[in-house]
Image (cartoon, rainbow, N blue to C red):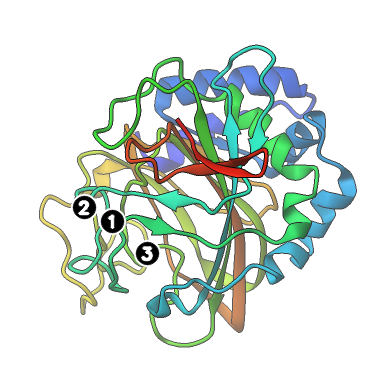
Amino acid sequence: ETPEDALESLAGVVEQETPEAALLRIQRELGQRNFVWIPGSTYRKMLKWKGAREEDLLALEAGKMHAEVPRDPEPNMYFRQVAFHRLVLSGGREGHAPLEAQMPGVTQIGTEEICSDTGAKVSFARSKTRTWPMPPSAYAASTVPLAIAALNEALLPEAHHPQGNINMDSPNVINDQILIRINKQGESDESPTPEGVHQDGTEVSSVTLIGRRGVTRGGESRIWKLDQPAGNYSSDQFGSMKKRPSIKTPNHFSWENCLFDKAFTEPWESVFFNDRLVKHEARGFDGVRPCQRDVIVNFLRKPLLDGSDTMKVGGRIVPIV
């Protein structure tokens, strides 16, 4: 099945579909395919169903909240603004609402899941334990995070896949809501994922477009089978390689491994995927410079075994277990 065929079947969304019906369909497709594309109008309607207020959605769409996101602390990623808003979910336990961690997000991605140097177009240590900037207060105080968390919780699988650095016995699930703005200003590789095809060390991840300014081409989100090697490949359009490669293509690369290929253009257009069962990337974009692409990325996983994940409880900092 080609990415176009997959998208055509996913796009059979009934305009009058209720949020409840949409959620059931999305749950089913995510379970069957390991990824699901959601039209922006559908996801926006679902967020309002879960309590997001119109004025908060509009503020995000206008770029006001992403404008306040701090620059990536990694110097080589000077073109990226990034911040983590961390919530702790109950994992489906009755009577347990999501809690705001009030602490920085932490990631630990395995070296086999993401390229740091060879295969990456921007080199730095991505697989070490990394601590991330906190979100703008305007986002944390808005109605959007809890609405997103409510939908995320409904899309978690009953059983998580084992990972060596994860506390699989924990009933808690960490939801990092990551605000990202990519600023394309020059000829260098100022792209959303210069690491190329990768995984994030999560159970479920998602990418939601919030807005684009000045972008006229590129920015495709792609989902790949696990057979696809991690890293970049030298291509300027789907299905073909550049005559003069800008980077060495990994061994065993195959276009047949691509399950989904779409440049998001509509605010709130999203793709959810099971990070244990597929790989993903976002391609570079360009347009009238400086141009920008704003997204919210979600990471969903159980806590880390080493206690790196923390939250504030009664004014004290405690590990999430």
Label 2 near label 1: C-beta < 8 Å?
yes
Q: Position of residue 181 (x, y in %)?
A: 59, 67
Three-letter amino acid code of the residue under disc 3: Gln
Query: Residue drawn at (54%, 21%), measured in percent from left and top?
Result: 91
Query: Residue drawn at (39%, 84%), measured in percent from left and top?
Result: 188
Q: Position of residue 5 (x, y in %)?
A: 44, 36
Which element type, helix, strand or loop, lies under badge 1?
loop
Sequence order check: which comes first, mark 1 or mark 2? 2
Q: Position of residue 276 (x, y in %)?
A: 33, 33
Query: Which residue position is annotated with label 2?
Result: 111
Label 2 near label 3: C-beta < 8 Å?
no
Residue lying farthest to the top in this orientation = 94
Three-letter amino acid code of the residue under disc 2: Thr
Q: Is the N terminus in the top left, top right, bottom left or bottom right quadrant? A: top left
The quadrant in which residue 15 appears is: top right
Which element type, helix, strand or loop, lies under badge 3?
loop
| Residue 42 seen in this snapshot | no
Relative to the observer, which residue lies in front, 123 or 85? 85
Which is closer to the viewer, label 3 or label 2? 2
Which is closer to the viewer, label 3 or label 1? 1
Which element type, helix, strand or loop, lies under badge 2?
loop
Label 1 near label 3: C-beta < 8 Å?
no
Query: Which residue position is annotated with label 3?
Result: 237
